[in-house]
Amino acid sequence: MKLSKVTSFWLALSLVLITGMVAAQTARSDRNALPEIGVVASDTVSIDKEMLIGDVIMRQMRAQAPLINDPLLTEYLQDLGNRLVIHADNAKFPFTFFLINNSDINAFAFYGGHIGVHTGLIYNAENESEVASVLAHEVAHVTQRHLARRIQSAQRASPLQIASMIGGILLGVAAGDPQAGIAAISASQAAAAQQQLNYTRSNEQEADRIGITMLARAGFDPNAAASFFGKLAAQMRVVSRPPARLLSHPLPESRIADARIRASNLPQVRLPPSLSFHLAKARIQARYIYDIEAALQYYSNAVNEPRIVPEASQYGLALALLRNDDVEEAKAIIEQLMAKDPSNLFYLDTATDIYLALNESQKAVVMLEEELKNSPRNAVVTLNLANASIEGEKYDYAIDVLRDFLLINPKHMLSHQLLSDAYAKSSRYLEMHQMNAEVFALVAAFPQAIDELQHAYNFAGDSHLDKQRIRARIQQLRDEQAKLERLL
């Protein structure tokens, strides 16, 4: 599904102060608590508070970070992450995996089971196990509560130092350069912030050990961790600036050796190439890494070379052709791919874009409705169906599809945006403003959300029920805003 670029919302919220002051307040209340090893650290940040802070950070990520709202890539990444999490010990909450449009090789984890992955990580990986090895490492950081334990170890630091530590980390990961956050910290605190930025050696060893075991349990190649480490080390030797991941995750040579030893003690597996991985990688290259000319040149050559997964080269070429408005050529390739694999979501998504480019939205709707029978409420199928219906001016149908989807995915940003668009195009301004309010709420812009609801109130007319619902939602948003303010 190809949509216009999502508008960035800027928050009137200081994440640094929220996180830092929570940590400082807890530290002051329990100065004599001894740090504990493993997953505990509950005397510093409770699980409930960790999830709350994670939700705040995720809202800011939606507003400011270059998140990719691509249902296909999101579903692939979430599925890959879930395959690891079900084999993790001490997973206290559902994990959320999301993609950042950044060509650096990096991934990061924060409170509440949130894990961000740069497009550059998938682009530089050779196989799915290498990506999974990095995700497993980050999952281990979360399940072992390493960030909470770092705060615990800094209990004697001032609140401002702790805030600087967290702020430096978040500024760094958003910019793709962990050291960038240090530039925002005053000179008197720079050394302390830099020390807190990097995970300790014991944290890294623990995450490596648990992550590689998790990788093997999930059926991936346990040697992939050492393989990816080796790739990062080789890159570090030939460039003046280390890969972004190594700035926050130092890589001494001993880590590569340790990873190889651990892998050798685990069951060895030989996996066939993952078609989903190679299609996801092709999508990232053709849409987010390469410009149109480079994508066309690369995939025009790739389809004529021996490839491990030739379908991925053909798919990448179809995407490049579609970007270049060579719609008929792209259509011919996708039709060939779908003839062999008609339910492949990557092909269905691109076929939808092709039909819409040809002003044949009804063909897309028919195709997607048939697939929805096999995959009810699948995000890729549902959102493409809604988008095609909107393009075909079937607004009421799109609205029904999206409202049903949001019942089980209430925080799905793209669904709210599509629903707002459907309401606007059908001149249902009451509901449009209500949906706009939900979009603002998802990025913690509560004053703007309340303003949208007040606009909605003006369209409620004589409907006392609508007015009552709007007043109740305004009060809920005010309560959520007050909850955030209490963290300060």
Image (cartoon, grey):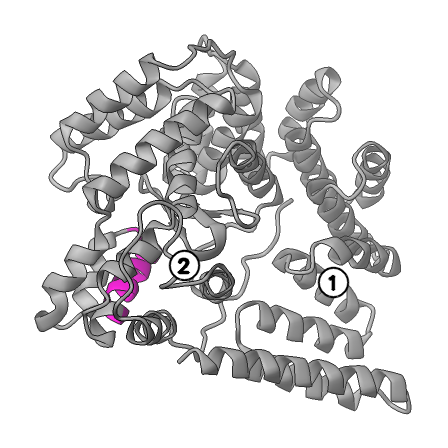
Counting residues from the N terminus, which is met first, the one under dot 2 or under dot 1? Answer: 2
Q: Secondary structure at mark 2?
A: loop
Frontmost residue, 164 versus 298: 164
User: Which corner quadrant holds the C terminus?
Assistant: bottom left
Frontmost residue, 13 versus 154: 154
Q: Secondary structure at mark 1?
A: helix
Q: Residues within 10 Å of mark 2 (few under 14, many from 20)?
A: some
Residue 148 image offset from top left, x and y in percent: 34, 57
Residue 435 image offset from top left, x and y in percent: 71, 71
The residue singled out by tag 2 in the image is: 42
Q: Quadrant of residue 144?
A: top left
The amino acid type found where label 2 is placed reads Ser
Q: Nearer the viewer, mark 2 or mark 1?
A: 2
Give the residue at x 12% y 29%: 237
- Report the disc number at residue 365: none
The amino acid type found where label 1 is placed reads Leu
Q: Residues within 10 Å of mark 1 (few under 14, many from 20)?
A: many
The stretch of residues the image draws in magenta is 163-176
Residue 344 image offset from top left, x and y in percent: 69, 27
Give the residue at x 91% y 91%: 462
Q: Is residue 227 above or below residue 308?
A: below
Q: Is residue 459 above or below residue 325?
A: below
- Report the disc number at residue 419: 1
* Residue 250 covered by magenta stretch: no
User: Taking 401 as reference, is 270 left or right?
Assistant: left
Q: Quadrant of residue 426?
A: bottom right
Residue 159 image offset from top left, x and y in percent: 25, 75
